[in-house]
Amino acid sequence: MAEHTHSIQSRGREEHRCIQVYEPVGIALQEWEAIRSVLCVQRWGTRQGKAYHNTAYYISSAATSPHHWQSLVREHWGIENRLHWPKDVVFGEDDYRLEDEQALLNWSVLRTIVINILRLNGYQSLKTAMTKLANRVDIIFSLLT
């Protein structure tokens, strides 16, 4: 077992991460024969004065150092926080109940395009952008050109 711990403090938050990387000794399932790493990622700290503690487990066909895993896991959550979370919270993506899977996929792609266009045009807050751009078709079209 190898381990890496990292701590950060910013914006009134304190966060600690500990990644433990194990070799997959004893995992005999044929479907998982390519597994090279088993990870236990613990995150704990305080957000807005409230304590939290989360544990997540990952399996991977890659074998690398705990320090490298640390950056990969942070990248993963960065994508979650910068794309998937806004799509759900700002656009209510999880509330859409379309029967047609292709339509769901198309709408998801369109939301991603909108998020990227807004960010490329300097909008850090999607909520602010949507409020400012509501009923402003002229500005919306100018963002596309």
Image (cartoon, rainbow, N blue to C red):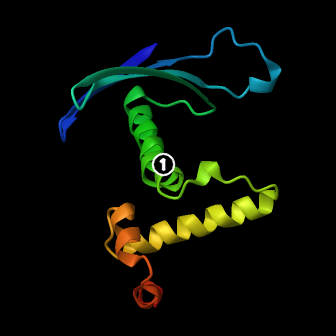
Q: Position of residue 39 (x, y in %)?
A: 52, 22
Q: Which residue has dot 1 on it?
A: 85
| Above-or-below relation of 31 to 87 | above
Report the residue that reaches farthest toward the top: 26
Residue at x 43% of width, y 53% of height:
82
Give the image quarter of residue 120: bottom left
Q: Position of residue 7 (x, y in %)?
A: 24, 28
Report the residue that reaches farthest toward the front: 135
Give the image quarter of residue 44: top left
Q: Is residue 2 left or right of residue 94?
A: left
| Above-or-below relation of 26 to 82 | above
Q: Position of residue 48 (x, y in %)?
A: 23, 32
Q: Position of residue 11 (x, y in %)?
A: 19, 41
Amino acid marked by disc 1: Trp
Give the image quarter of residue 49: top left
Q: Between residues 109 and 59, which one lies in front from this camera angle?
A: 109
Residue at x 56% of width, y 65% of height:
111
Q: Is residue 55 left or right of residue 57?
A: left
| Above-or-below relation of 31 to 121 | above
Q: Count how many numbered circles sit on residues in the image.
A: 1
Q: Is residue 19 visible?
A: no
| Above-or-below relation of 99 to 62 | below
Residue at x 57% of width, y 16% of height:
23
Q: Is residue 4 left or right of residue 76?
A: left
- Secondary structure type for disc 1: helix
10 Å neighbourhood of mark 1: few (<14), some, or many (≥20)? some
Q: Is residue 28 visible?
A: yes
